[in-house]
Each structure stands twice: as structure tokens, then as C-alpha cells.
Amino acid sequence: MIMPRGEQLLLPASPWFIGLSLFLALVVNLLPTSNWIWMPDLLLLVLAFWGIHQPQRVGMGVAFFLGLLIDVQQTALLGQHALVYALVVFVGQNSSRRLLWFSGWKQALQMLPVFFGAHLLQVLIRLAAGGIFPGFGLAWAPVLESLLWPVAVAVLLAPQRRAPVHDNERPL
């Protein structure tokens, strides 16, 4: 794969940083503000990001497990978030080769239908289980997640963009 002109070659992602970012997103989702219907699902956003950028390290199993934790915490239908998170990671892994060619804002536009589909699937599962319709304020969550996508790209790729040790003996 030929890199676009002007792009910096990224260092390998640290497994510790991946785990820390997933843990912090999980903690943010466990806050009481995550029950607001318009609040973006940061764990979904981080899982989608790592599913695209590191598909060999963050797969559907990790997404499913974290989704089960969210289901238990929110007393939701068991497997609701797990299914949605696993599907978002699956879609991200399948489209990663195409998405990585775009900049952050173009990736955000590409991820907007994925986020809308994820929230729509959650609502459909909730309605099929006998729940009530949460309202149209739910449409703000995927929009906010898409707006946060370039921020997530900048923050989560920052450790990989750090300058390598300069050596006068190496040509690169």
C-alpha cells in the first residue's frame, strides 16, 4: 500500500495504550450522564476506532465482552450493546482498508451511517423486548459521535505519531 504524500509513518500501537483508552471510554460510559439519550457512546466510538486501526488487537470478542459489561451496568437487555458493539467492530474491520485512505473528517462522514445504524439497532432491540421509544433526541448521539471522530483520531493516534529517536547514522 502506497502512503499518501505528506503522511507520517506511524509507530506501532502499544497494547497498554489501547487497553487504557478502552478502559477510560468504559469508565466514561459508566458515568450517570451516559443515560442521557443524546449523549454519545464513547465506548462505541473507541471500539470503532481501534477496530479500524488495529483490527488484529481489538476484535469482535473484546467488543462483545465490553458490550456485556455495559448491558449489566445499564440493566439493559443482556446482549443488546454486545451485539451492536460487535457489529460496529465487524463493519469497521471490513471497511478499514478503504477508510484509512481518508482524512479524519471524511472518515467521520463515512462512519455517520454506521453510528446511526448502531443506535437504530439498539432502539429496535429495545422495542422488540417491550420497551418504550426513547424519543427523537436519540438522533443527536450518532451526529455527536461523528463530530467527535476527528478528535478521537487525533488523540488516539498521537502516541503513534511521536517523533522517533533521531539518529544521524540512519538514512530514514
Image (spheres, helix red, strand yellow):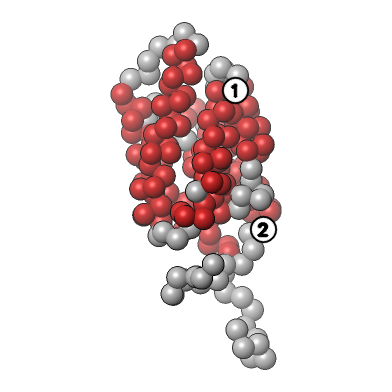
Picture coordinates of residue 55, whole percent (x, y): 61, 49
Regarding residue 39, the answer to whether it shows in the image is no
Viewed as shown, does residue 97 lie left or right of 150? right
* Residue nearest the observer in this picture, 14 or 126: 126
104 to 121, vertically: above or below: below
Picture coordinates of residue 24, whole percent (x, y): 58, 43
Can you say which quadrant of the picture contains the C terminus?
bottom right
Disc number for residue 79:
1
Picture coordinates of residue 163, whole percent (x, y): 57, 74
Helix, strand, or loop for circle 2? loop
Residue drawn at (39%, 34%) of the image: 116
Residue drawn at (58%, 64%) of the image: 160
Q: Comparing marks 2 and 1, which lies closer to the viewer?
A: 1
Packing grade of label 1 (10 A; few <14, some 14-19, many >=20) is: some
Helix, strand, or loop for circle 1? loop
Q: Amino acid at mark 2?
A: Ser
Viewed as shown, does residue 144 lie left or right of 94? left
- Where does label 2 land, which residue? 14
Whichever of callouts 2 and 1 sits on the residue coming sooner in the sequence is 2
Viewed as shown, does residue 132 lie left or right of 24? left
* Residue nearest the observer in this picture, 80 or 97: 97
